[in-house]
Amino acid sequence: MAQDKCAMKVNTDSLILGSWVNPNGAKSVLDIGTGTGILALMMAQKTDDAADIQAIEVDESAAQQARDNAEMSKWSKRISVHHQALEVYKPKAKFDIIISNPPYFEHSNKPTNAFASQSDARHSARQTGLLSPTALFQFAANNVSAGGSLYCVYPYQRMAEIEQAALAFNLFVTSCLVVKHDSKSDPYLCVYRFQAQRANDEDSESVAEFEEKYPTLTIRDHNSEYSSAFKVLCRPFYLKF
């Protein structure tokens, strides 16, 4: 897969997210902020031939690269890439799955030169300004089909904030995978599945109740090799597994 025109390259977070998705017969998928197109391609691989995959990307060079990658794949007829910002994107129908590996780095509150050397494209790809959690959840709430799902990732440290932001749009966590780099490190990522539910659902569970059920994925074992759990999850997308 080509990625030379993209500010953000293919990364482990996206591979975990795409591998973890349960398509459950989805016929329509939207990848928001597709970058290289990796998640759109993974969704094409995981769904049947009748599923339509749409992808949007605000950066023109990245959108063209995602389009090129899709055209070189065997799913080219099922993937459409649009160079468009989320706030102006007007889909014709709702989606069974909306998926996104959104930018989630906040601007630093301390003096730093860390962001000064970033290209404008990489800065946009990493910072929340162009796709805030609120914008993502609001769009998903309006554009996910009945029974459909929003899949996304956010830092573990922002768990309470993210889940409360989703609740504001009546999106509830129905499953979550907590990710650690290795057995000695603290969790760094939450991989979410959100779905819309009525506020008065008797069987809806609180955030605290869900937190007790979150499984954990450790990427590397004590030998710094990929863990067996990581291999099982991502095997369909890693040739070396």
Image (cartoon, helix red, strand yellow):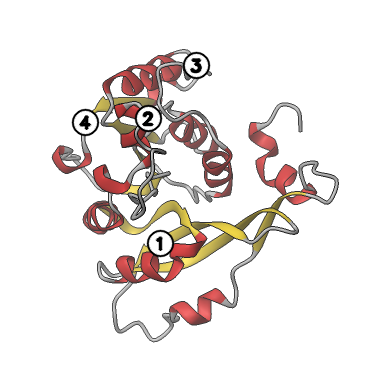
The answer for how far apart the CA atoms under marks 3 and 1 are is: 31 Å
The answer for how far apart the CA atoms under marks 2 and 3 are is: 21 Å
The image position of residue 199, as x and y in percent, is 29, 79
The image position of residue 158, as x and y in percent, is 43, 63
Question: Which numbered marker is on residue 98?
Answer: none
Up/down of 14 relative to 138, above or below: above
Up/down of 66 relative to 128, above or below: above
The answer for how far apart the CA atoms under marks 2 and 1 are is: 32 Å
Question: Which numbered marker is on residue 84?
Answer: 4
Q: Residue at x 54, y 75 (%)?
A: 211
- Residue identified by numbered label 1: 194
Disc 1 residue type (three-letter): Phe
Q: Earlier in the sequence, mark 1 or mark 4?
A: 4
Q: Viewer-nearest of labels 3 and 1?
A: 3
The answer for how far apart the CA atoms under marks 4 and 2 are is: 22 Å
- Residue identified by numbered label 2: 118
- Residue identified by numbered label 3: 2
Between residue 140 and residue 157, name the one nearer to us.
157
The image position of residue 150, as x and y in percent, is 38, 54
